[in-house]
Image (cartoon, coloured by chain):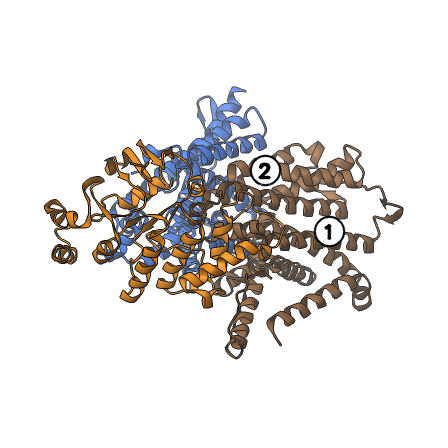
Amino acid sequence: MSEPVLRTERLTKRFGGLTAVDDLSISLAGGRVHAIIGPNGAGKTTFFNLVTGLLGPDSGRIFFRGRDITGCRPHVISRLGIKRTLQVKSVFPELNVADNLWITRQARHRFLHPFRSAARDPETKLRVEQTLEQIGLADLAARPAGTLSYGDVAMLEIGMALISEPSLLLLDEPTCGMSPAETSRAVAKIRDLARTIDIVIIEHDMDVVFGIADDITVLAQGAILASGSPAAIAGDERVREAYLGRPEDEDFMEEALHA
Amino acid sequence: MRDTVLLLAMNGLIWGLIIALIALGLSVIFGLLDIINIAHGDFFMVGTVLAWFSLSATGNFWIGFIVAPLIGFIIGAIIQRLVIQPIHGVAALSIVATFGLSLILQETVRITFGATPRRILAPIQGTVPLFGVEYEIYRLFAAAVSLAALAAFFLFLQHTKLGIWMRAVRHDRETAVAMGIPAQRVYVLTFGVGFALAAFGGAVAAPITTVDFRGGVDVLPFCFMAVIIGGLGNLPGTVAAAVLLAFLEGMIQSVADPTVARISSLVLMSAVLLLRPQGLFKGLAK
Amino acid sequence: MTRRSLEIGMAAGAAAFLIAVPWLIPALTDHFWVSVITEILIWSLFAASANLLFGYVGLLSFGQALYFGFGMYGVALGIDHFGLSFWPAFGLGITSAMAMALVSGVFAVRLSWHYFAIITVVFSLIFYFLAVSMKPLTGGDDGINFSLPPVFRMGRTVFSLTDPTFQYFFVLVVVSLCFFLMYRLINSPLGKGFLAIRDNDLRASLIGLNVYVLRLIAFVMAGFLAGVSGALFAFFGRYASASYMFYQVSGEAVVWTIVGGAGTMFGPLVGTTLFIVIREIVSSHWEHHSLIVGLLAILAVIFAPKGIVGLWNGWMIRLDERDAATSAPPRLTLQAKP
């Protein structure tokens, strides 16, 4: 059994009296798409924040392909190959779409040249053009990213994730706020990416989850409630209980069970 | 020598109480509206000028204690409505706006009041022996008035509708709005309250300092020091820090010159900003 | 008429004007305006230092006067106290400004932006008071006057430093060089990194940019610009005073930048020109020109928050869009900042 892509050992994070992540020991194998689901406040985004270095854990360790990354700063973790999208779509609003991709690509270099013209880097320029094609935003290349529609911003974020050639991609509710059409587009892209990149995705949309995920981990109150294949999760009583009070999810669970 | 130390220490303490009023105004504006108010020293200066004008118009000094904060409140509210509100509180722009405001206030005073500094005679003359030193009665009186005003302000915050609204909006704006508190109106009134506090401090301080259109320039950094060292949003902390700083500066002045005192306060402020940005008096906050 | 050709035309016109100033101005009006324009150039470089930090990196510094002061005193004390000649004094001014920027930046840049703005003021105040207290050396608020060796050598050519025409061209060349460096910087990979941090520093760190180091680099570069302007100021007034390190001076630079247009190349130049010209014209008739400055600042932030150049860019973009609607689909271009 090869080294898991992402592994945590007894990861804990508290905010005042609230324990957001509670003694979490999770192990995610490579080559599969993992979904992390759970009711609000279950600690999912906090988990991502810990992995990407935006927060420091109170105790526990985090390993990325066997390498201890606990306590590393965000840009260091990013350079190791972990990239993520944010729950609230977040790009560089005053830069145009092409430049958003451009700077994402350039950020992997340790040294940014202060005086050479940015336009002159042919390799990056090519990659930007390719990525624009891939995400279908080529005609919006010169528009400031802040003027894009929500769905396009989400695609841009995915494009930025793509162009940075991540080794592990963390997607935080990528389809949140999207129309059904935009959602299918995004799901197709993610499936595409999954062929070459390890992906962990936080989602509330059960259709998406059951459509993409190979493994599902359910978090509740900062700890693992259940984990396993989609079928196992759909049939798990405890999981359904955790989702009580969220009728729309319960319906989906019903459907998934009988799918 | 001992006399001088005592004198300077007491002066420091008293000045600290007066400044605490002014700094409180800044703390309220900064803490609630998120605005770095560069004109705040000039709010104080306007208070001293209003005191001077009401004295020369009516011959009665005490009227200034009412006129200054009242007019200050009105001007503050108008400023918030006309200048601050349109820029939707975009913080960087509001700094420029308050900078412009500072220039306008200083020049307006220069035009109406003139460029020469004037003095106001203390309404209560005479000294009283205190700890072996002859101490001016008015200064003691000013300290008492400031203490009373501070106490009144904290009571206001706790027990009046506006006070409670101000605390609610400061604490959690979204919930406050959801509960039906008119946030915009609170902002307008808050700015007015901030101006009024500074102007009142000016009226109280007028006989102790000079009335001069540049009088705000020195007060401003001091207020910011009190707010930062006391802790942003920590009103009692601001008061404690103001008194402490003024007292410390007074003490240092007994062995070195005033510039050194000011530099040491600034260094202390830098240390707080870098090492403990939530301020030194965290425990005092509610 | 496309946007690009219009802007190139304006730039060429402005350049021609600037080069012709020493002959054009005395022919049209008082010779005194040549020194005003020289002053405008120096102060616009100072405003540019605030612009680099605020407009391009998103750091509002209210304390650039500190580095201006180091540049100014570096030259003044270098010549007056240490007996240095022109270039070494210039070098001293610039390096001491950059060194100070590095030391203070290491601490300041760590802070979130409210506290950053405040601590930049605090640092500049500390040194202002230090300068005032060291009056024998610095002249305090009254300042010190010093004299320059009257002769400036470059290779085999000798110029008289007191010649206003030479002064003007020296300042013009230095300031233009600095603006050119800024232009290259903004369009470079590092420049794009700055913009990313300005737009969204969280995202910037997530894509791998070291936000702290990049901010520090920008801070030192801004210190360089402020230091150069301070050094030029000392050279051409032959005067240095602590009052130029006060926060009001820093504040003016920020106002000029924002009114001119923060985040644009020529914003600082436009803003500085506007305010200094107003000051010169108004103050000869009415002593309360600060009132106008204050009013303009407030009107600008309410009605034109992107500044004059920002407004212009807005109109130009609409012009562009009208052009684009009637021509071929847009090609992929990496956006170069004007």
Give the chain of mark 2: C
- Residue B279 location, x and y as percent? 40, 35
Mark sitting on residue C174? 1
The answer for how far apart the CA atoms under marks 2 and 1 are is: 23 Å
Q: From what the image shows, is residue B282 above or below residue C333?
A: above
Which of the two residues, B59 or C209, is positioned nearer the viewer here? C209
Q: Where is residue C173, by image quadrant?
A: bottom right
Task: Give the labeled residue for mark 2.
Answer: C102
Give the chain of mark 1: C
Amino acid carrying mark 2 in the image: Leu
Chain coloured blue in this rendering: B
Q: Where is residue B144, by image quadrant?
A: top left
Which of the two residues, A101 or B203, is positioned nearer the viewer here? A101
Dot 1 lies on which element?
Answer: helix
Residue sitting at 41 percent across and 58 percent down?
A: B80
- Residue A100 location, x and y as percent? 47, 56
Residue C33 placement, left or right of B46:
right
